[in-house]
Image (cartoon, helix red, strand yellow):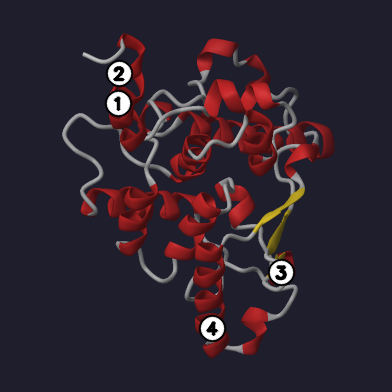
């Protein structure tokens, strides 16, 4: 089974199974020991990403967003224009969105440092306002302050796996994935924001604050990639090193 699913999925299944076995040992006395404790480090696949991240330009992101549905596009827009992790995006509630102050209150889902207020960029504000209007037409309960921002048509929380599939499929339809290129995932949108921010001249501390990293060195070591547009401009920037021909 582990060979047919991602490392994070396999580890999630192991954690769930371990909890069941722990309950059987501690509370029910049905078994003597938890067999999951016998697993060694190499028995489960790594949860680390094995593919290279994709750094998209703003134009490429907009092409991708144009291929997404009204249900998935606002989530993807939040991942890029808000620099949100997918877990943070789907945890948003309407009380976290302040259209007047142009700010988003991000609930920390990874570390204490990830809890912060970030700017609500105009592009995302427009997307969320349109999304809120659509949700309101389906019922006032969907746009209450305590209501989640993102839900499916049936009112359930969106599936991270379905959102990933939607983004990957949209990227292909937008012509962003050529033969031999890595697929585009939800986290690539967050990474792309960082790459574009560096390209605009923001410093490591500023980008780290935007991404809510406690240490700017993490931002530099993981997120300081270049979009294809930025790479194409490197030749012109470096030409001056050799002087005029």
Distance Cα–Cα, label 1 vs label 4? 45 Å
Which of marks 4 and 3 precedes in the sequence?
A: 3
Query: Residue 82: x and y, percent?
Result: 58, 53
Q: Vertically, is 244 above or below 96? A: above
Which of marks 3 and 1 precedes in the sequence?
A: 3
Query: Residue 17: x and y, percent?
Result: 62, 35
Distance Cα–Cα, label 4 vs label 2? 50 Å
Residue at 31% in and 38% down: 183
Q: Which residue is mark 2?
A: 239
Q: Which residue is mark 3?
A: 98
Q: Are marks 2 and 1 in contact (CB under 8 Å)?
A: yes
Secondary-structure class at tag 2 = helix
Q: Is 228 on the left or on the right of 16, as rendered?
A: left
Q: Vertically, is 15 above or below 88? A: above
Q: Are marks 4 and 2 in contact (CB under 8 Å)?
A: no
Q: Which residue is mark 4?
A: 133
Q: Nearer the viewer, mark 1 or mark 3?
A: 1
Secondary-structure class at tag 1 = helix
Q: Nearer the viewer, residue 140 or 6?
A: 140
Which of marks 2 and 3 precedes in the sequence?
A: 3
Distance Cα–Cα, label 1 vs label 3? 41 Å
Q: Which residue is mark 1?
A: 236
Q: Vertically, is 245 above or below 132? A: above
Q: Vertically, is 104 above or below 198? A: below
Distance Cα–Cα, label 3 vs label 4? 15 Å
Residue at 43% in and 32% down: 6
Q: Is 20 on the left or on the right of 197, as rendered?
A: right
Q: Is 225 on the left or on the right of 24, as rendered?
A: left
């Amino acid at each position: 089974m582990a060979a047919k699913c991602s490392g994070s999925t396999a580890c999630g299944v192991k954690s769930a199974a371990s909890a069941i076995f722990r309950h059987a040992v501690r509370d029910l006395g049905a078994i003597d020991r938890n067999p999951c404790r016998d697993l060694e480090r190499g028995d489960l696949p790594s949860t680390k990403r094995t593919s290279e991240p994709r750094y998209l330009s703003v134009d490429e992101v907009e092409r991708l967003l144009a291929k997404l549905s009204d249900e998935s596009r606002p989530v993807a827009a939040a991942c890029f224009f808000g620099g949100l992790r997918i877990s943070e995006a789907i945890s948003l509630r309407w009380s976290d969105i302040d259209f007047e102050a142009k700010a988003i209150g991000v609930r920390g889902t990874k570390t204490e440092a990830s809890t912060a207020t970030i700017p609500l960029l105009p592009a995302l504000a427009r997307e969320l306002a349109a999304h809120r209007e659509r949700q309101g037409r389906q019922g006032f309960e969907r746009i209450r302050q305590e209501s989640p921002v993102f839900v499916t048509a049936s009112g359930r929380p969106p599936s991270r796996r379905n959102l990933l599939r939607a983004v990957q499929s949209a990227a292909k339809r937008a012509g962003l994935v050529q033969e031999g290129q890595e697929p585009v995932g939800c986290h690539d949108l967050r990474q792309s924001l960082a790459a574009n921010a560096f390209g605009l001249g923001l410093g490591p501390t500023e980008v780290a604050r935007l991404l809510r990293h406690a240490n700017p060195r993490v931002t530099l070591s993981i997120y300081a990639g270049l979009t294809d547009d930025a790479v194409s401009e490197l030749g012109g920037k470096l030409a001056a090193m050799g002087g005029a021909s």
